[in-house]
Image (cartoon, helix red, strand yellow):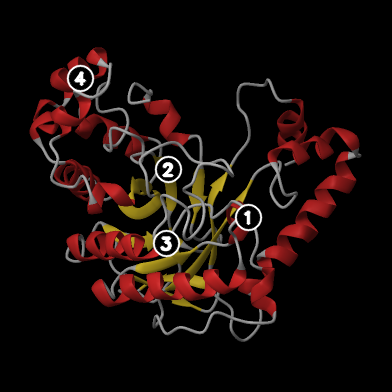
């Protein structure tokens, strides 16, 4: 997957705040004010338009470094008006492989063309540790005034997600809660003084048969407080159940932890979101578009949108939204035409 092109970095977008009067933010840190994320230096709403950049796969370095120099990759983001990146990583990169050399890791893969590409475009990366490679990425993003949301995508470096991937929920084979908290803490401490990092997420798309609310409350609270203690300047981004689509249980039992003005929730929106499984997206071909669109909006409001309303309103961001751009999915084509 390291051979991906720069275009693939922009398939998923996240918008922190999309209010018409919001201005692009260059400041650090950010905080919350009701449903809004604000620039602490001005007190005004902050608008962050972000691209998703994968770094959680087996090589444990951000994709594309074999194709273009890092400075050019980041420059491409700036050219396309992105001022933020959701940079994904695996917990094991911090807890098990942080001091391993990138070139040594590639010796376990049959990918000589990727190594040759990195040697040509970003030769110094091969002799870095995985942590150093990530830091180099964050530093270059910061140098070009692109902010970073560090996203814990998985524990075991691999693609995400399937219900049986053993990465989905607490106490899965590759989701030990204590090692997870250790990894979050290491990442938070490492970037505590790096002004490019404005937010950290707890976990991408909790999923699988072990899901339960008791463990969600227990461990998400511990993880959020661990990040906040290690780096109180960053926003702490909290994900829900069922592939980050469900928060409705918070209606009757809010998450009561003190993160100051740093708590943000995230959700994802795809053609199958809220229907339970990706197979369920077939509903887009079984019902009239106006009906399924209305049902989807109502479902989104019920599952997550309510978090932005009322006296205890908090920001809710879409950290993934998208559709199959190849045109091969009838369901995604119909969903796209309805938006």
Measure how far apart labels 2 and 1 are at the Cα level. 23 Å
Q: Decide which of tag 3 and tag 2 comes sooner along the chain.
A: 2
Determine whether label 2 and label 4 are within 8 Å by CB.
no
> What x and y, as percent, mark residue 73?
28, 31
Nearer mark to the viewer, of 2 and 1: 1
Determine whether label 3 and label 4 are within 8 Å by CB.
no
Measure how far apart labels 3 and 4 are at the Cα level. 31 Å
Helix, strand or loop at disc 1?
Answer: helix
Residue wearing tag 4: 115
Q: Decide which of tag 3 and tag 1 comes sooner along the chain.
A: 3
Measure how far apart labels 1 and 4 are at the Cα level. 37 Å
Q: Decide which of tag 1 and tag 4 comes sooner along the chain.
A: 4
Residue wearing tag 3: 202
Measure how far apart labels 3 and 1 are at the Cα level. 15 Å
- From the viewer's perspective, is residue 316 above or below residue 150? below
Measure how far apart labels 2 and 4 are at the Cα level. 25 Å
Nearer mark to the viewer, of 3 and 2: 3
Measure how far apart labels 3 and 2 are at the Cα level. 18 Å
> What x and y, as percent, mark residue 193?
17, 65
In this orientation, does residue 255 appear? Answer: yes
Residue wearing tag 2: 51
Residue wearing tag 1: 242
| Picture quarter with the N terminus | top left
Q: Nearer the viewer, residue 212 or 83?
A: 212
Q: Residue at x 32, y 73 (%)?
A: 226
């Amino acid at each position: 997957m390291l051979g991906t092109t720069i275009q693939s970095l922009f398939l998923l977008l996240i918008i922190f705040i999309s209010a018409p009067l919001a201005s692009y933010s260059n400041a650090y840190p950010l905080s919350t004010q009701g449903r809004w994320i604000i620039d602490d230096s001005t007190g005004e709403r902050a608008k962050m338009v972000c691209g998703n950049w994968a770094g959680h796969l087996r090589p444990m370095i951000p994709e594309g470094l074999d194709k273009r120099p890092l400075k050019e990759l980041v420059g491409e983001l700036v050219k396309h008006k992105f001022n933020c990146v959701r940079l994904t990583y695996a917990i094991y990169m911090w807890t098990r492989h942080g001091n391993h050399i990138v070139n040594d890791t590639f010796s376990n893969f049959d990918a000589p063309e990727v190594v040759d590409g990195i040697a040509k475009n970003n030769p110094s990366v091969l002799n870095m540790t995985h942590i150093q490679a990530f830091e180099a990425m964050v530093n270059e993003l910061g140098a070009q005034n692109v902010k970073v949301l560090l996203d814990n995508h998985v524990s075991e470096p691999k693609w995400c997600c399937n219900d049986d991937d053993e990465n989905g929920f607490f106490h899965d084979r590759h989701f030990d809660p204590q090692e997870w908290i250790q990894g979050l803490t290491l990442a938070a401490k490492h970037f505590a003084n790096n002004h490019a990092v404005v937010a950290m997420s707890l976990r991408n798309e909790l999923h699988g048969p072990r899901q339960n609310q008791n463990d969600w409350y227990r461990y998400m609270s511990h993880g959020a407080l661990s990040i906040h203690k290690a780096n109180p300047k960053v926003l702490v981004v909290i994900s829900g159940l069922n592939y980050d689509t469900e928060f409705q249980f918070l209606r009757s039992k809010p998450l009561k932890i003190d993160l100051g003005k740093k708590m943000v929730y995230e959700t994802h929106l795809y053609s199958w979101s809220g229907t339970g499984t990706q197979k369920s997206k077939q509903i887009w071909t079984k019902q009239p578009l106006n009906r399924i669109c209305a049902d989807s909006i109502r479902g989104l409001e019920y599952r997550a949108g309510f978090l932005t309303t009322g006296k205890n309103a908090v920001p809710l961001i879409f950290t993934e939204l998208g559709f199959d751009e190849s045109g091969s999915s009838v369901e995604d084509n119909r969903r796209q035409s309805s938006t």
